[in-house]
Image (cartoon, rainbow, N blue to C red):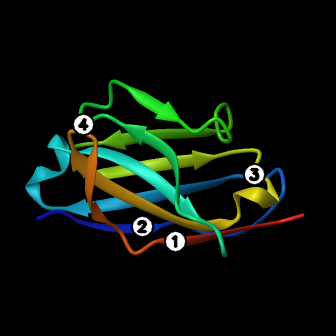
């Protein structure tokens, strides 16, 4: 069973950057599609970005396209989310998730990102 631990969150001013990391334990990581999701207070969890198991394909929510980049290093069992040009609306708890066939069955505990105006 894969376990996921996020890190890299924090407080940043609008226009700044952060890089989130999600470290995975377990041999199955390299076979998992990985995604980042976020949940702001009072809102539902929403999709942010995803990358296929090989890293060959990515997709993004329209709200982050051009600002965020998802990547993975299967040798390090880690997936990243580089976030640039951050906006106050990006404030949320960010979760990484993994799974196969479009179903995310494994989730991390989340890392808080706060963007001040």
> In the picture, residue 115 is in which quadrant?
bottom right
**Where is residue 84 shown, x and y percent of the image?**
70, 45
Which secondary structure lies at badge 2?
A: strand
Vertical placement of residue 116 versus 87, above or below = below
The answer to which of marks 1 and 3 sits earlier in the sequence is 3
The answer to which of marks 2 and 4 sits earlier in the sequence is 2
- Residue shown at the point (70%, 57%) measured from the top left: 90
Q: Which mark is residue 111?
A: 1
Which secondary structure lies at badge 4?
A: loop
Q: Which mark is residue 70?
A: none
**Where is residue 97 shown, x and y percent of the image?**
34, 57
Q: Residues within 10 Å of mark 4 (few under 14, many from 20)?
A: some
**Where is residue 56 shown, x and y percent of the image?**
33, 24
Q: Residues within 10 Å of mark 1 (few under 14, many from 20)?
A: many
Q: Residues within 10 Å of mark 2 (few under 14, many from 20)?
A: many
Q: Which residue is mark 2?
A: 6
Q: Are marks 3 and 4 in contact (CB under 8 Å)?
A: no
The answer to which of marks 1 and 2 sits earlier in the sequence is 2
As measured in the structure, the alpha-carbon distance from the residue carrying label 2 to the one carrying label 3 is 19 Å
Vertical placement of residue 55 versus 32, above or below = above
């Amino acid at each position: 069973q894969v376990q996921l631990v996020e890190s890299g969150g924090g407080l940043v001013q609008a226009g700044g950057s952060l890089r989130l990391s999600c470290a995975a334990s377990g041999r199955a990581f390299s076979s998992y599609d990985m995604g980042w999701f976020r949940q702001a207070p009072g809102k539902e969890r929403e999709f942010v970005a995803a990358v296929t198991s090989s890293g060959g394909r990515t997709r993004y929510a329209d709200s982050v396209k051009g600002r965020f980049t998802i990547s993975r290093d299967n040798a390090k069992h880690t997936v990243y989310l580089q976030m640039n040009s951050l906006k106050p609306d990006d404030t949320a708890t960010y979760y990484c998730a993994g799974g196969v066939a479009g179903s995310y069955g494994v989730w991390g505990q989340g890392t808080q990102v706060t963007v001040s105006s």
